[in-house]
Amino acid sequence: MEILLVLLAAVMIGFVVLPFLRRGRGGITQVPAGHPDAADPAGYGFALEEELDVRMPGPDQDLLDVLDLVQRTQDYRGAQQLLAGTDATSELRWQRVQAFAGAASLELAARPGGAGESPGGQWLRVWRAEVPKDAGGAAVHAEFLVQQAWRTATPGTDEFRIIMEEARAACGGAALLAPGDPVPYIVELSVARGLAYERGDFEQVWLKILDRAPAHMGAHLAALHYWCEKWHGSRELAYSFAEAAAARAPQGSLLAAMPLFAVFEHLPEVNLVSGFYQSQVVTKAVHGALHAVHAARPDDPMAAHVRHLLVFFLVRGERWAEAMTQLTHIDGHVGALPWTLSPDPAAEFAVYRALAVAGYEANGGSPATLP
């Protein structure tokens, strides 16, 4: 009991001090003395920090197997076949396009080429050259260019604009190859943000997505960025967009969680209000997200995104048992907001998981009581 009391005191100290140390939505820049970072995840079946997969928000074994094959052999055909067999309007296809594009972009960053060495991501260039009419390859290439722009150039510079213009052209080409596929237009949403489309032009792209996949969660998250205060909208416009999406969400849709993402995108740079995470706006958004994951299909690939963000808000709101429940669903994968904003997503996730475990146990919880 004495150990638990000490641990609880450490957690409370951390929550008093952390708001003053956290900047924006990034990582914890300093861990207070006595922080329960050493909480053992093994008792709950949680993965060790070094075992956490930073590539994806949740499991997709088919994708992992194909990614491993493509990167090991530099043969694109596995990726081509996987995308061809994935429903064009599904969340899974969008996630897989992002994953293949990200893999190629990171390969290129690790091996830029030169001095007789071929550049990384060569399999994507071969894919486009050998099968130029393949819709999957075209979509991956467009997303690859977008990721290259954000990863290698600074918004507002000529270099950034040139890459984004190339991405815009690639989106148009990909859309022509697959008229009913929303993915090229979802990719263009990021282009629209980077190139500061006029609202009318942005809404034209958005309407094309709604015609093809009106309840696409990934598309809504991509569009939300445009409406945020830090880009081309405002807090009010972002909240309005998110709340409208939640209001028209069909039964079982994760769109009901959109307001929580809008709240996250507008967190104060420095939070000096200790009760912010118990405030009405946060509580209402958390409630909507909890309802959304409860009502969603167990295999909905976007559920992991919502659960990861819920862990962040539930821990900050000291709702330990609910945070632990979410962790049982997503532990092992950390490729999602808010962890991906940190230079070390696995470490950031592990700190919040340790806080959840400590708070849960300090309030009488144990591995035996966790559902």
Image (spheres, rainbow, N blue to C red):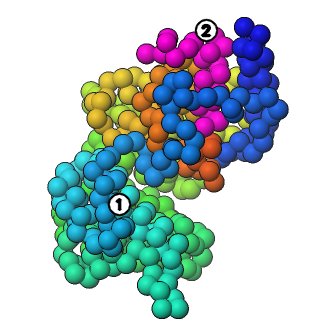
How far apart marks 2 and 1 lie (CA) works out to 43 Å
Badge 2: few (under 14), some or many (20 or more) residues near its Cα, within 10 Å?
few
Question: What percent of the width, then of the height, locates residue 176?
Answer: 21, 70
For residue 364, the mark is: 2
Question: What percent of the width, then of the height, locates residue 20?
Answer: 79, 36
Q: Residue at x 67, y 45 (%)?
A: 27
Do labels 2 and 1 touch, CB within 8 Å?
A: no
Vertical arrangement, residue 43 with respect to residue 196, above or below: above
For residue 68, the mark is: 1
Q: Which residue is drawn at 38% across and 35% down?
A: 303
161 in magenta: no
Single out the residue that lies furthest toward the right. Answer: 33
Q: If you read the primary sequence from the N terminus, does the residue marked by circle 2 or circle 1 appear first?
A: 1
Q: Can residue 73 be seen in this view?
A: yes
In terms of secondary structure, where does tag 1 sit? helix
Left or right position of 87 against 15: left
Question: What percent of the width, then of the height, locates residue 214?
Answer: 27, 44
Q: Which residue is drawn at 32% across and 24% down?
A: 295
In terms of secondary structure, where does tag 2 sit? loop
Single out the residue that lies furthest toward the bottom. Answer: 116
Single out the residue that lies furthest toward the front. Answer: 42
Between residue 6 and residue 177, name the one nearer to us: 6
For residue 177, the mark is: none
Range drawn in magenta: 350-371
Q: Residue at x 62, y 15 (%)?
A: 361
- Single out the mark in the foreground, 2 or 1: 1
Question: What percent of the width, then of the height, locates residue 343?
Answer: 63, 54
354 in magenta: yes
